[in-house]
Amino acid sequence: MNDVLAELRALRAGDLPTHGGRTLAYVYDSALPGLDELAASAHALASSVNGLDPTAFPSLLTLENDVVRTAARLLGGGAGTVGTVTSGGTESCLLAVVAARDSRPDVARPSMVLPETAHAAFHKAAHYFGVRVVAVPVDPVTFRADAAAMAAAIDPSTVLVVASAPSYAHGVVDPVAEIAAAALDRGVRCHVDACIGGWVLPHASDVPPFDFSVPGVTSISVDLHKYAYCPKGTSVLLHASADLRRPQFFASAAWPGYTMLNSTTQSTRSGGPLAAAWAVLRHIGDDGYRSLAHRALESTRVLREGIDAIDGLRVLGSPSATLLAVAAARDDFDVFTVADEMKARDWYVQPQFAHRSSPANLHLTVTAANAGHEAGLLADLRASVEAAVAAGPVRVAPEVLEFVGGLEPDSLTPEEFAGLLAAAGMGGGDGVLPERMATVNTLLAAASPALRERLLVEFLGALYS
């Protein structure tokens, strides 16, 4: 047994750190002592329990109702608000879309109206459920959704309108009140994607209402494994009423076994993540979350001011939450090189490719663990920019960039994709990327979005072979 655990620890040693605030994406660290141990113990107590049937395991029913009640209270819910604990933000968004679609069986070709900054989970839902996406351009400077343009995009086929609080890419809160009012006027559901901000924004002082207190908001998604600092695998999808939630449920008696009845996309699901989330919510409590939110928000403010003071960098938009998008303010260096330099200094910042008016940038997710440690991050970021300036912009032969930019993914064979991956440094066969990714990211940036998607799908397939 000890040998197995030792092997697992050795494998984990190659991962990005999940504590200490040095991984500025993917993970959320409260820096509270003992929280991991509490969550692990609670998870172990319920890991063998099956959430498929709440009548067989009523403990999970109690836990889920408690968790939903906590989320609803935080997000302006009333006596009629209902919810479901899901495996994560993507599942919550998927279920919001399928509930909206199935609530309108009279619409032959349903569509949903999104700001172009909405999370890719909604495009995934559209792909899975046959809902057409109407992506509306956002303000090119603030990156906030254009409420008037979104209202104009609503038509008889629209079953859902989406707003972000905040958007992942820029940390910007959309004008939820105006968007929800337009949806309400047209009799269309309005979902607020608060997956990443829902446990922080209620504690911010300068954020306009975005929750169920806003007329027209019919559902909200909020992730517990983000700023509720619960272990991975828990999100909540809230609906303003049971009638709105009902189409989300699935039942089938069309086989000789038990009647399948699901509240989520899953059937069997471990009670472990739910129990761990319940324990963490109970332990931290309202006052604890208020303190954690203020720490993260204040740290974000300090970092934003510090980044603005670094020659060559600028923060995109006007972020209201705990996410920053940091772009180059000059053309004598490359942000992809800055990301490599930060990695060499034991920081992970997430590269984001250019999209419409949003230039290539680095994403920073700030958590409570960053509070008090901003000076070190800013010093290393400044040094990384200086190193990137000294190195100069990434240089790839113009003919290579032109070639990549002109490729059509549908006409390429698997062998040609393998060649492209190898040329980009992503085709070693063992799934190991080069230590420095600036050139790889530059080549990916030159590819069309469709080609980039296909290249990364092929790369993912190579990883899991």
Image (cartoon, helix red, strand yellow):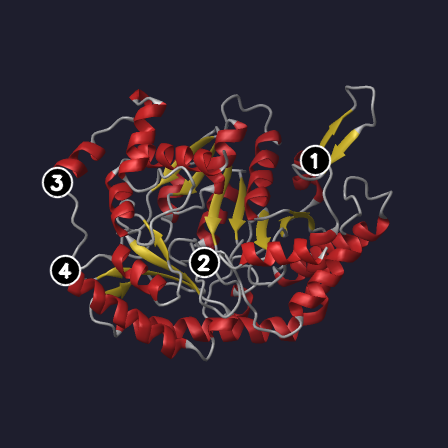
Q: Quadrant of residue 40?
A: bottom right
**Foreground: disc 3 or disc 1:** 3
| Amino acid type, label 2 | Ala
Residue indicated by mark 3: 398
Q: CA distance from mark 4 to mark 3?
A: 17 Å
Q: Dot 4 surroundings within 10 Å: few (below 14), some, or many (20 or more)?
A: some
Label 2, secondary structure: give it: loop
| Amino acid type, label 1 | Phe
> Residue 332, which numbered label?
4
Residue indicated by mark 2: 25
Who comes first in sequence, dot 2 or dot 1? Answer: 2
Is 253 positioned to the left or the right of 378 in the image? Answer: right
Q: Please tell me which residue lies in front, 166 or 148.
A: 166
Are the residues at dot 2 and dot 1 in contact (C-beta closer than 8 Å)?
A: no
Residue indicated by mark 1: 249
Is 381 positioned to the left or the right of 210 in the image? Answer: left
